[in-house]
Image (tube, rainbow, N blue to C red):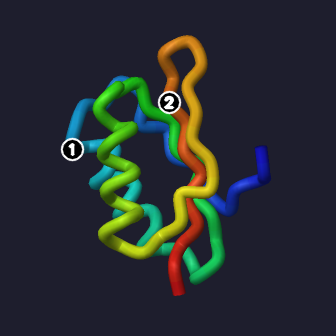
Amino acid sequence: MTTATQALDAKGLNCPLPILKAKKAIKGLNAGDTLFVESTDPGSVKDFEAFCRSTGHKLLESGEASGIYTYLIEKAA
């Protein structure tokens, strides 16, 4: 995995908290910076896809291992 500019631990949080916390974290980043998110909410898969689609941010990577969902998001210009 690529090294992210910032990491967000959203494990144990349910919808919509992982997205809301990611939105807040991304706001503080510069265009092109990346945010790595970890979540245990299975619904976050669709949520992060929709979030990136609607905001223009790029979902560079996503995956799941042992019930932990990970996302690497690049902030749009």
Image: 21 above or below 34: above
- Specify the farthest residue to the right: 2
Q: Mark 2 points at which residue?
A: 69
Q: What element carries label 2?
A: strand
Q: Where is residue 32 in the image (x, y as percent from the top left)?
A: 64, 77
- Report the quarter where the N terminus lies: top right
- Specify the farthest residue to the left: 16
**Is 41 or 7 nearer to us in this picture?**
41
* Number of other residues with Cα within 10 Å of mark 1, as a class: few under 14, some 14 to 19, many 20 or more: few
**Residue 33 image-quadrant placement:** bottom right
How many dots with numbers?
A: 2
Q: Name the residue under label 1.
A: 16
> Residue at horizontal 39%, vertical 38%?
45
**Is 54 or 34 nearer to us in this picture?**
54
Q: Give the left or right position of residue 53, taking residue 26 as reference.
A: left
Q: Where is residue 30 in the image (x, y as percent from the top left)?
A: 58, 81
Q: Is mark 1 on a helix, strand or loop?
A: loop
* Number of other residues with Cα within 10 Å of mark 2, as a class: few under 14, some 14 to 19, many 20 or more: many
Q: Give the left or right position of residue 31, taking residue 2 as reference.
A: left
Sequence-first tag of 1 and 2:
1
